[in-house]
Amino acid sequence: MKNPIKEKSILLVLFFLICSIPAFAFAGEDKSAKKEVKDADYYFDLGNKYRESFMYNKASEAFKQAIKIEPNNADFYNSLGEVYIDLKLETAAVDAYKQAIKIKPDNAEFYNNLGEAFYNLIYDKEAIAAYKQAIAIEPNNSTAYFYIVFISNMSMDYKGLAEAMKQQIKINPDNERAHYDLGKAYFNLGMYKESINAMNQAIRINPEYDGAYHYLADAYSVLEQYKKALAAYKQVIKIEPNAPLAHLALGQTYWKLGKYEHAIDAIKQAITQHPEYADAHYNLGVIYTIKKDTGSALDEYKILKDLDKKSADKLFNLIYP
């Protein structure tokens, strides 16, 4: 038979044991849970997850929360800037990247990102300045180097490009691309002798650099050093046989030297590689006209009518002045 008094006694003991558990035991669990929610890294990781899921607005809010908790973390500002770029908020991105750089000024990636934001805003000078800072920190920074060349070419800032490439060459004298881009800048500035020197340096480093040979040949041609131009164009074709532009340039150079048959052969090769090459057909028609071969010139005129009417009309007026 059960003893009701004994059972009540056991229940009372259990009740008092439960009541006697210190309040801080539960409080500690709540505190750690709250700490997890407020932790800056938690929000940073959350922001990255949102960004990976293309939830850019939520990602920006998470990164802002991380910054609020830990305001001196440069990586948080950099990530916020990247999300602003995703959101096409370039001005806000610039501010975020500048704050990251202020905290950690020796980080090349931050300057690369700042350069991207300025470039998107079409602030070319500011973009190039940022990329130059990236290179100063990290001399072999290929991203920064690429964008300096790209922006300078797009904006036709050849003086700026030349200065940037000279700086790059100081850092790495055997950078073939820097010598090439320096030569290209000089060529566009009308400094042909300097362009030749730069291209020869690129070729010294890389004897198979067909682009450098092409600019070298163009510079010689402008300076009316046609035999040297001829040799350089032949080198382009030797390296890259399927180069209609080089074959046309070779033909034009033969033409300037009065070697019409060689010119015709070279230009025909350009047309074989690119049958709809209007400039090649026009030049070939002009040479036939000079040679008084009206029938062949008219053949080129007929082809040109379907490719470039303006050039066709121009050739026709040469055939029948």
Image (spheres, rainbow, N blue to C red):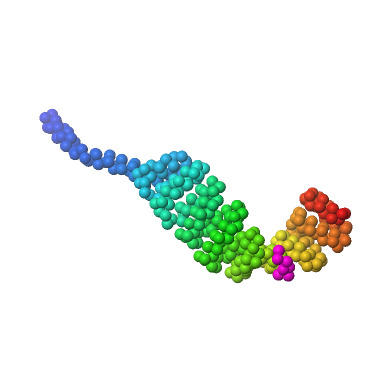
Q: Residue at x 73, y 62 (%)?
A: 249
Q: Is residue 241 visible?
A: no
Residue 243: image quadrant is: bottom right
* Left or right: where 240 falls relative to 21: right
- Decide whether residue 75 is among the magenta residues: no
Q: Which percent across, then down, holds residue 220?
A: 69, 66
Q: Which percent across, then down, holds residue 125?
A: 54, 52
Residue stretch in magenta: 222-228
Residue sitting nearer the eye, 249 or 187 = 187
Q: Residue at x 88, y 54 (%)?
A: 320
Residue 63: image quadrant is: top left
Single out the residue that lies furthest toward the top: 4
The quadrant in which the N terminus is found is top left
Residue 197: image quadrant is: bottom right
Q: Residue at x 61, y 54 (%)?
A: 156
Residue sitting nearer the eye, 3 or 168 = 168
Q: Which percent across, then down, holds residue 152?
A: 58, 55
Work out whether 16 lies above or below 264. above
Q: Is residue 164 visible?
A: yes
Work out whether 42 lies above or below 219. above
Q: Residue at x 47, y 43 (%)?
A: 92
Q: Which percent across, then down, holds residue 284?
A: 80, 59
Count of all numbered marks drawn on residues in the image? 0
The quadrant in which the C terminus is found is bottom right
